[in-house]
Amino acid sequence: MHTDIEHDLTSDQWDVLRALRPAMVPARKPNGYIVEQLVVLDLVTLSDGAPRLTSKGRAVMLRGSPRLWDLAA
């Protein structure tokens, strides 16, 4: 299955996005460099110094990674 996705994220970027989900309790502070990359992609915003998923970031999370789909198939 192949679907067009606007972003080809690295595994580290996916890890940070997953860690920022509201239901997740962060085990540690996310990597600031990766958070900044996600801010540039408009997937994360900084609110009071804390990273938060944007609506675009949530949509990307819902679609998931095509690389992960390939592994699951």
Image (tube, rainbow, N blue to C red):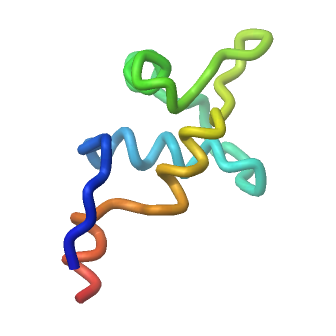
Rendered view: 44 above or below 15: above
Residue for point 61% across, 36% down: 28
Q: Quadrant of the C terminus?
A: bottom left
Residue for point 40% across, 48% down: 14
Residue 40 left/right relative to 68: right
User: Relative to the observer, which residue lies in front, 36 or 64?
Assistant: 64
Q: Position of residue 35 (x, y in %)?
A: 48, 23
Give the quadrant of residue 70: bottom left
Q: Check the image and name the residue furthest to the front.
A: 4
Residue 15 left/right relative to 65: right
Rendered view: 49 above or below 28: above
User: Relative to the observer, which residue lies in front, 59 or 15?
Assistant: 59
User: Relative to the observer, which residue lies in front, 65 or 25?
Assistant: 65
Rendered view: 14 above or below 53: below
Q: Position of residue 60 (x, y in %)?
A: 48, 50
Residue for point 20% across, 71% down: 2
Q: Position of residue 68 (x, y in %)?
A: 29, 69
User: Relative to the observer, which residue lies in front, 62 or 24?
Assistant: 62
Q: Position of residue 15 (x, y in %)?
A: 44, 48
Residue for point 75% across, 16% down: 47
Q: Quadrant of the N terminus?
A: bottom left
**How many circles with numbers are drawn on the protein?**
0
Residue 60 left/right relative to 68: right
